[in-house]
Amino acid sequence: MFIFIGGSKNNNGVIQTVQGPVGSDTLGVTLSHEHLFSNFGLPINETSTYDETRLLAQVIPYLTMLHSQGVRTIFDYTASHFGRRADLLKAISDSTGISIVTNTGIYGAADDRHIPKYAYDASAMELARRWITEANNGIDGTSILPGFIKLAFDQGPPSQIDRKLFEAGLLTHLETGLTIAVHTGDNPDAVHLQLDLLNKYGVHPSAWIWTHANLHDDFELLFEVADHGAWISMDGVNHENIEQYLEYIQRFKDADLLDRLLLSHDGNGYPAGGDIRPFEAIPKELIPSMRSHGFSESVIDQLLVKNAGEAYAIRVRRTGEREN
Ligand SMILES: [Zn+2]
């Protein structure tokens, strides 16, 4: 149906980190949605520039601390055009021993302020070709490959540009097998549009992550979507809301849907040069609280190790093909 020149690397079933491919069962404790740094909010042509000395001096000790708390892998959600720097992620991974996974794609939320002009002129297919080229050849002149696709919908009725970016994501998935993580939040219209388009393109919902699903409080829809095989990312864990997350986990357990749930903080190690927005509550507070509330080690392992490996393992997921 869609023919591309070239073709993907043979990386079926692996997780693509900034240091290269690793087995999806080797991730260890994983934070599935964080930002090691970003320049969110800055003008679009200034988002790749950092005071690198200051950035590394702030982020490396923080990740070293997280490593001592047991964290082994972090999925970095800072997209191109709001601060992605694959070379800095690699330097941080090299000096901390934490595996880091970066992304391709374009972030369409925040009133489109981080969408470059070329994206409006290009077709979904042309955008997909750019992202497929990154997935095959590397990001910004490096040989570092993205490990997933990062996209976003604004609040309200889905816009043409956000829809086109998502269609480009579907085309990229069909060629590369990269999982599509989409900032969707509390937007049922965007959820339904994405499910319709997944179906139209023949992509199984297990290739899609509903990012910031914790902002949506209708569990009926969360469970319905999870039941279709989609990933539900509850990515707002912090020091203040551990009890609430224990309750979310219990509800997913009662619904027998723990195998669709991803947990993270959406923290930031260097937000436009500012102070760290912490991403340490999961190892320091949530995991110990799960133990004291009687959750088994196998549930903890499922939520913080296994699910991320499953969600992000690179493979084309077509509708009608059996999952697992
Ligand atoms: Zn985020």
Image (spheres, rainbow, N blue to C red):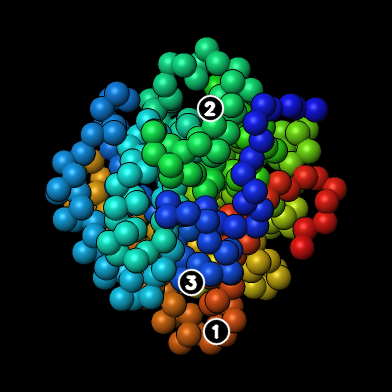
Side (left or right) of 12 relative to 137:
right
Report if residue 109 is visible in the image: yes
Which of 246 and 112 lies nearest the eye of the viewer? Answer: 112
Sequence-first disc among 1 and 3? 3
Q: Is residue 174 above or below residue 233?
A: above
Q: Is residue 80 above or below residue 124?
A: below
Could you say where residue 298 lies in the image, as x and y percent from the top left? Answer: 59, 81
Badge 1 vs badge 3, beta-carbon distance below 8 Å: no
- Nearer mark to the viewer, of 1 and 3: 3
Q: Is residue 87 above or below residue 285?
A: above
Q: Is the distance from the Cβ of mark 2 to the nearest ligand 1 atom less than 8 Å?
A: no
Using the rendered view, name the quadrant where residue 45 is placed: top left
- Residue visible at 77% across and 63% down in the picture: 324
Which of 116 and 20 lies nearest the eye of the viewer? Answer: 20
In 3D space, how far apart are the residues under numbered discs 1 and 3 (Cα atoms)?
13 Å
Could you say where residue 163 lies in the image, as x and y percent from the top left? Answer: 61, 27
**Disc 2 crowd, CA 10 A, few/some/many (<14, 14-19, 20+):** some
Residue topped by disc 3 = 28
Q: Callout 1: helix, strand or loop?
A: helix
Q: Which mark is residue 130?
A: 2
Sequence-first disc among 1 and 2? 2
Q: Is residue 178 above or below residue 112?
A: below
In 3D space, how far apart are the residues under numbered discs 1 and 2 (Cα atoms)?
42 Å
Image quadrant where one finds the N terminus: top right
Count all numbered tags in the image, as a single digit.
3
